[in-house]
Amino acid sequence: MKKILAVTACPTGIAHTYLAAEALKKAAQEKGIELKVETRGAVGVENELTAKEIAEAQAIIIAADTEVNESRFAGKPVIKVSVGEAIKNPGALLDEALNKKATASDFINQVQQVKEEKSNQRTGVYKHLMTGVSYMIPLVVAGGLTIALSFVFGIKAFEQKGTLAAALMDIGGGAAFALMVPILAGFIAYSIAEKPGLAPGLIGGMLASKIGAGFLGGIVAGFLAGYIAKGLKDYVKLPKNLEGLKPVLIIPLFSSLAVGLLLIYVIGTPVKSIMDALTTWLKGLSSGNAILLGLILGAMMAFDMGGPVNKAAYTFAVGLLASNIYEPMAAVMAAGMTPPLGLWLATVLAPQKYTEEEREAGKAAAILGISFITEGAIPFAAADPLRIIPSIMTGSAIAAALSMAFHVTLRAPHGGIFVLPIPNAVGNLGMYVVAIAAGTIVTALMVNLLKKNK
């Protein structure tokens, strides 16, 4: 029996929500179709669809005139209409749902929607940190790849003044990388206090960079600047005719002074010591410790596929690029590519274990995987978390551990396979491909070992 799911919702949540549900149920019964309808009415959500039911459904009908969370239907054919349409033509809607097939582009669009919804759900410290990181990443990409291009002329070629190699190094290292920490701090502060936080955040970030406190100092400076600026904005009251001075004079001046003095005399030295110790430890990692670090970072990348744990590992690796430590970045990107690639390979190796929609979703997951979009694994994980999540964590941990063991380096924090052909962007490219392939194969084999035939 064909199985269709539906969601109905109208603005008032009273009449049309339930009329549409009844019309769909009656038409489904006449056609011999198994149908479950989730109603989102005035009394709340009733008959809520489960992840298992969504995984087993052939298609989803959304008959709604209000907002409905579609991210849970990623990878499924979805038909969206008004509640009125469901009341008038329920049979035609069911026929359309039976004939509709999910395409790779549908899957990719839905995964992008999941990413946007996750981004919108960020709050508090996590939101502020990710805002800073998102503004920093383009500088890291541009700077890292420009430095890599300068090495095309030779590792030491940039030392010869006036050459193209020297110019490329000035652009990448002297400008782009020099702005990384200030931009990180500035936009953390901007996220907290909006425009008044930007100046003290940028100044604090530049100071952190100058004193050698690195990305850790930038994070501290950004939060200090943001909360100090917000405190001044919220609690300093001036006569109405002087209020205009707050955003352009009082907040930037006093918050910049406070952040700067705290960094120079109180916080800067301890943070620099921590950063120096971390850098020394990472540069002197033994083979065993490097593999252990890779296992941890890899498992974190796959654990929540774009969530806070994933982003913590990613931010750690990106921040180290400013200190010329490139191995963790390579490990993290390999681990982020492996989950969707492994799930694609799983659908190819054992198609009998997957529905037609899942096999189609696997093709799209491959595209997302090579692009370093870990969220491509989310629909598979949502449908079968107990089998999928341990499998992708294992594969990602192996990919990252092998990358660290082979001393692979990566100068760009994003791009997937598309940065691999760039000269000197990846160190030990051949073994990097081996690490990604190994993680992908382990993921696929483990998933198929645990899954039953459909």
Image (cartoon, grey):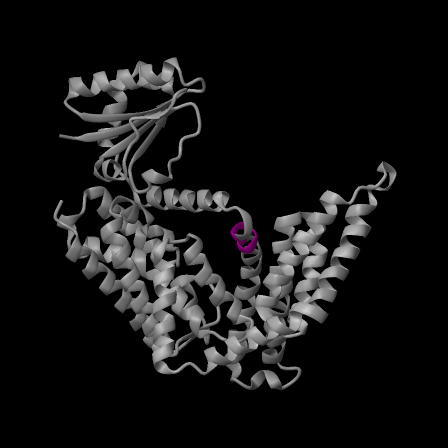
Image vertical order of residue 38 relative to residue 12, above or below: below
In this orientation, does residue 421 appear? no
Is residue 127 rendered magenta in the image? yes
At x 31%, y 71%, the residue is: 435
Query: Does the magenta stretch mainly form a helix, a strand or a loop?
Result: helix
Q: Position of residue 411 (x, y in %)?
A: 48, 71
Image vertical order of residue 45 relative to residue 119, above or below: above
Seen from the viewer's position, the closer of residues 204 and 146 is 204
Query: Seen in the image, is 32 located left or right of residue 296?
Result: left
The quarter of the displayed image where residue 358 is located: top left
At x 53%, y 78%, the residue is: 277
Q: Position of residue 327 (x, y in %)?
A: 43, 74
At x 40%, y 62%, the residue is: 416
The quarter of the displayed image where residue 240 is located: top right
The C terminus appears in which quarter of the rendering?
A: top left
Q: Seen from this angle, which residue lies furthest right?
A: 241
At x 40%, y 31%, the residue is: 68
Seen from the viewer's position, the closer of residues 123 and 92 is 123
Residue range highlighted in magenta:
126-130
Image vertical order of residue 253 relative to residue 322, above or below: above
Q: Position of residue 25 (x, y in %)?
A: 23, 19
Query: Seen in the image, is 20 located left or right of residue 189?
Result: left
Seen from the viewer's position, the closer of residues 161 and 80 is 80
Total label count? 0
Seen from the viewer's position, the closer of residues 79 and 29 is 29
The N terminus appears in which quarter of the rendering?
A: top left
In this orientation, does residue 263 appear? yes
Q: Position of residue 399 (x, y in %)?
A: 31, 68
Query: Seen in the image, is 59 located left or right of residue 112?
Result: left
